[in-house]
């Protein structure tokens, strides 16, 4: 059985995967909102760099920036375009601290 997902056809398994991903995204956003997060960026190490694999900016912050800037850019959206060397920098230091704290 094939259904339409937007302009591309997708099968039932792809549709279920999409729904599950959307539900997971909603749970993450709910958690960030409950904790009054303004933005969040999820970095993942890929080879010798860290790349953003997810980002969030609160609706209120997005609206405020849109009124002032009008370009749809946020700190998180612009940071997500970066590739950060894994050998140094704040993301690398935070990853090392997190890894070390799990050992303790």
Image: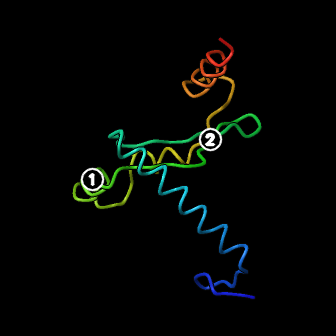
Q: Secondary structure at mark 2?
A: strand
Relative depth, front residue between 49 and 57: 57
Graded by Cα atoms within 10 Å as few (under 14), some (14 to 19) or many (20 or more), the crowding at tag 2 reads some
Q: From what the image shows, is residue 2 above or below residue 20?
A: below
Q: Residue furthest top?
A: 104
Q: Position of residue 81 (x, y in %)?
A: 55, 49
Residue shown at 65% from the left, 11% from the top: 104
Q: Position of residue 19 (x, y in %)?
A: 59, 68
Q: Which mark is residue 83?
A: 2
Q: From what the image shows, is residue 19 above or below residue 51?
A: below
Relative depth, front residue between 8 and 36: 36
Q: Quadrant of residue 103?
A: top right
Q: Which mark is residue 60?
A: 1
Q: From what the image shows, is residue 9 above or below residue 28?
A: below
Graded by Cα atoms within 10 Å as few (under 14), some (14 to 19) or many (20 or more), the crowding at tag 1 reads few
Residue shown at 55% from the left, 41% from the top: 42
Q: Position of residue 48 (x, y in %)?
A: 74, 34
């Amino acid at each position: 059985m094939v259904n339409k997902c937007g302009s591309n056809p997708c099968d039932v398994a792809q549709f279920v995967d999409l729904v599950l991903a959307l539900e997971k995204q909603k749970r993450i956003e709910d958690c960030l909102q409950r904790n009054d997060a303004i933005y969040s960026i999820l970095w993942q190490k890929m080879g010798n760099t860290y790349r953003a694999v997810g980002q969030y900016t609160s609706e209120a912050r997005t609206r405020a920036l849109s009124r002032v800037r009008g370009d749809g850019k946020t700190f998180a959206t612009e940071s997500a375009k970066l590739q950060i060397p894994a050998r140094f920098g704040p993301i690398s230091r935070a990853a090392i601290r997190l890894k070390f704290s799990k050992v303790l």
